Image (tube, rainbow, N blue to C red):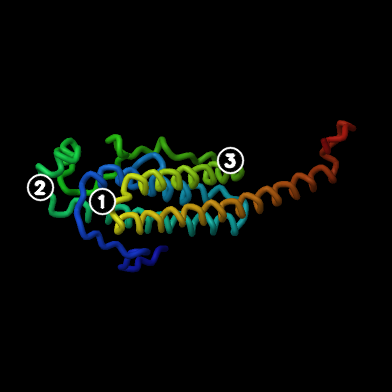
Amino acid sequence: MYHYVKTLQYPINIKCRNPKLAQVIISQYGGPDGELGASLRYLSQRFGMPDQKSKAILNDIGTEELAHLEMVGTLVHQLTDGASAEELEKAGMGPYYTDHGWGVYPQAAAGYPYTAASMAVKGDPVADLTEDLAAEQKARATYEKLIDLCKDDADVIDVLRYLREREVVHFQRFGEALNGVQEKLYQRNKFYLNNGNNNCGCDNRN
């Protein structure tokens, strides 16, 4: 069960609309390394975790990514709010306006829509958590590229820096989860070995 708080996780107040920035920022809404994919990935992977701690970490971060999805959508909306069709076309958003008007649609900056093919759910806790570590680094790198592109808009950069910092925190938490899962799996395998399941007579310590 989720409890919705009717305020953004971090305040957003864009003073000047800029559809050109919205065109690239939208990639973190529905692009391959964006917040929608991250949330669905983590909330799906949690079912395959071997302990409550790793499940809780995935649940917490997956839920926070929904909050970040709302923030990115708010950025896109405020950057295009009040823009004319001509302004959107001049900014390169003519095709987007044709299909979605002033709505916020999950797609990459390159224009292709969100697809679940961009997210991985392997059902193996080590594989999934390793995937999550990489995903957070890719998201961090994307936010850094966006910050480079938005360097002339302090209001936008402020929000992007906050989101980037949260990706770093998520990376650290997934590292904790992976260490815990690997230790749990090591102890389980050690138990099996000590109870007669290694009958080949060889030394597997190397």
Q: Amino acid at mark 3?
A: Ala
Please determine whether, in this image, residue 197 is positioned above or below residue 103: above
Disc 1 crowd rating (10 Å Cα; few below 14, some 14-19, many 20+) is many
Front position in the image: 150 or 40 = 150
Q: Secondary structure at mark 2?
A: loop
Specify the quadrant of the image occupied by residue 101.
Answer: top left
Query: Which residue is label 2 attached to?
Result: 84
Q: Secondary structure at mark 1?
A: helix
Please determine whether, in this image, residue 99 is positioned above or below residue 157: above
| Position of residue 173 measured from the top left corner of the image (x, y, whole percent) | 56, 56
- Number of labelled discs? 3
Q: Secondary structure at mark 3?
A: helix
Query: Which residue is label 3 attached to?
Result: 127
Q: Amino acid at mark 1?
A: Val
Query: Which residue is label 1 attached to?
Result: 76
Q: Earlier in the sequence, mark 1 or mark 3?
A: 1
Q: Residue at x 46, y 56 (%)?
A: 165
Q: CA distance from mark 3 to mark 2?
A: 47 Å
